[in-house]
Amino acid sequence: MINFKRTIYLSLVAGGLIAGGMTLQACEDEFLDKKPLSELTDASFYASADDALAALNAAYDPLQWDVHSRMSWIFGDVVGGDTDKGSTDDQDYSEILQFQNFTQTAGAPLLMDFWSQLYDGVYRANLVLDRVPLIPAQNIDATLQARIIGEAKYLRAQYYFDLVKVWGRVPIITKVLNPDEVFVARPANISENWDQIEQDLRDAIEVLPVSYTDADLGRATKGAAQALLAKVNLFQSTPEGCANTPYATTDQYQEVVDLTGAVMSSGVYSLDPNFSSIFTLEGENSPEVVFAVQGVGGTGGWNNDNDGLALNQWIAPRTSNFSGWGFSTPIGPVTPQGYGGNPNIKVNNIYEAFEPCDPRLEYSILEPGDIIDHGAGKVYTYDNTWSRTGYSIQKFLIPEAQLTGAANSPLNIPLIRYADVLLWRAEALNELGRTADAVEAVNMVRARARNSMPGATCPLPVPAGVSQAELRDLIILERRRELAFEGHRFFDLVRTCRAESVLRPMGRPFITGQHELFPIPQAEIDRNPALQGDQNPYEG
């Protein structure tokens, strides 16, 4: 679905129409099957509906680059303590180990990769928002034009949300900049970032359709905008007992309840009866998926696996039968192999966060002795010899027969699931003192998990009479189980003031007030005088 070839990243500087010769790769019967942008010039572009759609499709593309295929598991799962850097030794991609141990500096190349790709997404969205309104009315249907603008605003909000999660205050750019305008400072208060994101999403909600069909599946919908706005509001809110977080403005729990209620009442979304099917081709764009990065097989996208046997090559198991690189290995109770002697690795580990009878444990984590059936007679026993922790990620593993080429699998990356929406709702209701209502939302997620495997005896419903404080802890635990390895853990710990209490016992030297946000890339500070002297308080 989404697949572009990129040859250069953009940062804050607004380049020409076609950045670095980016071209659109055709994908049969999908919404990105448009003529290559490289065939267009600034003079001829933005003259028709087809041109507007081509530019919009290009604005979707940065979602599938490192932003959500690599950075999500590094920032969310490795830094968040659910996984180890992985691979076989400390020297293999040692930069990830620096993130894990909070020793990276502002000069870390990964920081610049993430920053530049996200601002590339902002730039592409701004191109659409600047130019599409100028297309002559006779050349584009007004409803389509409004929808394209709404999708671009949704995308800009998503890119800025990812930026704010990692860096807090970031430069706000809402138009294509001239060369003399490119040096933009950070706002004085993070509320300015949130206000911009919220406005984009409110605008998108007004014009986006409830759903799409056929080749347009995967585009941003009204429900996706409502859900992302709910998440934005949740990040700004501070749970009881939590000191001020780097994201906090004022509590907006009622807005979270209202927005999640709108998503629920739309009739479009529901929990998939089978938890494991969400992460298969059959479960793509199902009613469980509110928004996902769309992937295409055989085109060099996010799920690279050079032997075509597993999932994302970065996190695919490294065994005698799999040629994955084995990064981001889940942490559990078995003896680590080649971990480096850290005696605390097992503390607060993700494996033991699950009850042994919870089907999500089996569906999420590969452990020694597990059988992997790839069809066509290819049945393997998981061999953890090359896993630093003794485990590998099971989510996103699909049969070899479903792969369309050696370059990558076609699996999508879910960014917002209906289960996530329900847990946001539960968290907000509980903070508002409506604990009984919150329990109902949590139990929907737990019941689906239990019913996903015949004979499963847990997780059981949350017992009646649970206190607000008890449910607050349970919801965060439930998020950890339900959303394991989907890139959420570290940010959940930060926004609920739990990072230090969880990570330091594991031997991760997190310091409150210092490590919640990451340093702005030094290369960006060096080139932008407006950022000098305004670094985050991060010391590795």
Image (spheres, grey):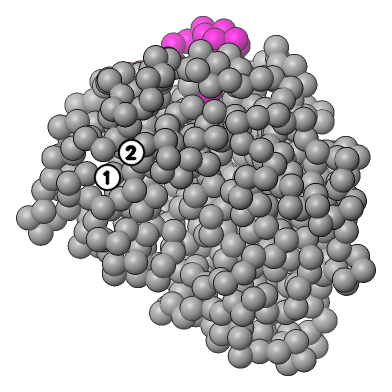
Q: Is residue 124 above or below residue 163?
A: below
- Does residue 318 show up magenta in the picture? no
Residue under the point 59% across and 25% down: 493
Q: Which residue is situated farthest in the left direction here?
A: 377
SS at mark 2 in the image:
loop
Mark in front: 1 vs 2: 2
User: Badges 1 and 2: C-beta atoms under 8 Å apart?
Assistant: yes
Residue 390 or 216: which is nearer the viewer? Answer: 390
Residue 84 or 266: which is nearer the viewer? Answer: 84
SS at mark 1 in the image:
loop
In the rendered image, which quarter contains the C terminus? Answer: top right
Q: Is residue 497 above or below residue 369?
A: above
User: Which percent across, then down, holds residue 212?
Assistant: 53, 66
Q: Which residues are magenta?
A: 459-476
User: Which percent across, then down, holds residue 359?
Assistant: 28, 30
Report whether residue 326 is seen.
Answer: yes
Q: Which residue is under mark 2? A: 88
How many angstroms separate mark 1 from mark 2 (CA)? 9 Å
The part of the image, by quadrant, that contains residue 41 is bottom right
Q: Is residue 259 above or below residue 208?
A: above
How many discs mark residues in the rendered view? 2
Q: Looking at the image, tell me whether mark 1 or mark 2 is earlier in sequence order.
A: 2
On residue 318, the disc is 1
Report whether residue 202 is seen.
Answer: no
Amino acid carrying label 2: it is Thr
User: Which percent across, then down, holds residue 515?
Assistant: 67, 27
On residue 429, the disc is none
- Is 315 positioned to the left or the right of 516 in the image? left
Residue under the point 56% across and 79% down: 23
